[in-house]
Amino acid sequence: MAETAANTETRGFETEAKQLLHLMIHSLYSNREVFLRELISNASDAADKLRFEALSNPELLEEDPDIQVRIEFDPDNKTISVADNGIGMSREEVIGNLGTIARSGTAHFLESLTGDQQKDSRLIGQFGVGFYSSFIVAREVEVLTRKAGTKSGEAVLWKSSGESEYSIADAEKSERGTIVILHLRDDAGEYLENHRLRGIVKKYADHISIPVLMAEQKFGDENEEGDDKDKSAEPAFEPVNEGKALWTRSRRDIKKKEYQEFYKHIGHAFDEPLDWSHNHVEGKLEYTSLLFLPKSAPFDLWNRDGARGLKLYVRRVFIMDEAEQFLPLYLRFVKGILDSNDFPLNVSREILQKDPKVEKVRNALTKRVLDLIGRLKKKDAEAYAGFWKEFGQALKEGPAEDFGNREKIASLFLFSSTESSGDEQDQGLEDYVARMKEGQDKIYYLVSDSLKAARGSPQLEVFRRKGIEVLLMHDRIDEWLMGHLHEFDGKPFQDIARGKLDLGKLEDEPEPEDDGEYADLLKRIKNSLGEQIKEARVTRRLTDSPACLIVDEHDMGMQMRRIMEASGQKAPESKPIFEINPDHALLQRLDRESDESRFTDLATILFGQASLAEGRGLDDPARFSSRLNKLLLELTGE
């Protein structure tokens, strides 16, 4: 590599970066060839960025308008070089992009490692650390780069052996762009063979819209290394890949494997997509979309301000990487491209926010993604169960954000229910409605902190006795979700732990309208518990338990209260309603108790038990234990 270097600076990697590099070098050997895919993908991105910048600044192309990637190998020196004439990097960008590995994502990456090489290697792309897969095969990596529009003396040379530090120096480079040189390890000799490298390029880069060049192969009079030829002669290069943007081809001509490799390219993923949708639309608007459903959630899925969106092209010219305007936030996990003929080449994020055509495309793409997810749910229950585990909570944001599609979104939901045999969320709303009892006009649900707590909730007792199915919701987002989802298929939702019980036509005995014969007992309970409860009343929802706690119709539930408190917000003041089962022996014993001190102890213990069953916890656990111990001693005659 011909360059001069000066102003050399040596920097140390951060601790997390050292860990990651050590992992790359010593652990992730399950699919070593992906290093070349990642370098070609980076080169392709650099080419796309140059094309976009050159729209407003044609001088950036200098005298070299034909953008390409060139791969060379040198068996004698055991090196592979991947060169592009794309946008290049400045010194600051080199430090930012290569000096701090994956930045905030590194810690999450390391925390997510499982010890399984196959699974861990897939995380490389998921966490955006693909460049560092070079160290799987290289003992040292050099990067020589010059930013388009700068002078030849403003190039930068970055070097690292993948251990504790890297060097960065000023350098000379006549052409814009980046050259990555890998000094291979002794056990990586297979990548110094022409046919091996060509095979990898064909496998991973056929769909890239710029040519990937390698030296022409000569047969007959010379072998692949050209031992008998003049090595000083400049070799002729030829494209190895097809070099046509995959989404511009007819669906009939694209193989399944090509779609899968294209997804890995644009998503920097190491696993295959669950499914995809490739469509060309003509009419008032003309565009092509290629949308993918991933198998695995990115580490920053819950960072709502994180990078997201489709790759946007205008007439096959790359415009931007993260065009978030074309899909709603709850579908932020979708990967893909949009190529439109209806936007100007100089389109910006600000212009997109004001363009009415964007809303039409967004609505169409949203429906297409929801249809794609719906088809997956119907055709492959096992794959959908995996998808739901990864992205279900993101989809639950949908009804609040996308009112027009809330019914379609809700049809994709899975919940646990009293019909579930295992611990997985496996019941859809359509399944629930199909199983509703004759005369049932509501969809009943219960929100709890965990599935175990929900299954043990006393509020379920009357529903179990009558054989009425109840959805058991235990995701943190569920109470918030139900504040925006009021009905499905014309059937209103009913929280069985909120307000008075209403079973409609399924009711044997309606809830009492007044306190009746239990007025004195309820008054004594209210006086004993005081400000801990809003009121005490009789219920028919209990069959085995003596009492339970209910949220008043318009009060905030415990799950939503905890979310607000965890985020530092003050939750509105509210108290539970204490409902009693007058047929239970404990309540009958309580009613006969004449000693007001013992009555208060018994009532307080019943309230504490109901609080624990509800998952509320106890305000004063020590005092509760003291009362309980006192009662136990009296019962044992001690």
Image (cartoon, rainbow, N blue to C red):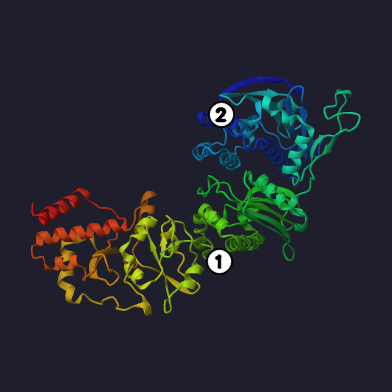
Residue 124 picture location, percent across and down? 59, 39
Q: Using the image, determine if residue 286 lies above or below residue 269.
A: below
Q: Above or below — where is 494 with respect to 567?
A: below
In the image, farthest residue toward the right: 221
Q: Residue at x 11, y 65 (%)?
A: 593
Residue 346 in sight here: no
Of 375 and 370, the residue lying toward us: 375
Could you tell me how many numbered marks the image carries? 2
- Amino acid type at circle 2 is His
Near-viewer residue (551 or 569)? 551
Image spot of residue 119 (x, y percent): 57, 42
- In the displayed structure, 373 sits above or below 106; it is below
Earlier-in-chain disc, 2 versus 1: 2
Q: Residue 592, percent across and down?
A: 11, 68
Residue linked to disc 2? 22
Residue at x 53%, y 66% (from the top left corner): 411
Q: Is residue 623 left or right of residue 31?
A: left
Indicate the amino acid at tag 1.
Lys
Disc marking residue 408: 1
Q: Quadrant of residue 497?
A: bottom left
Q: At which x and y percent is residue 533?
A: 23, 62
User: Is residue 600 in view from this perspective?
Assistant: yes
How far is the residue under mark 2 from the one under mark 1? 47 Å
Rendered position, 449 above or below 195: below
- The residue carrying pointer 2 sits among few (fewer than 14), some (14 to 19) or many (20 or more) residues within 10 Å by Cα, namely some
Other residues around mark 1 within 10 Å, as few (<14) / some (14–19) / many (≥20): some
Left or right: 201 as drawn, with respect to 463: right
SS label for mark 2? helix
Secondary structure of the residue carrying numbered label 1: helix
Quarter of the image containing the N terminus? top right
Direction from residue 260 to residue 210 in the image, left or right: right
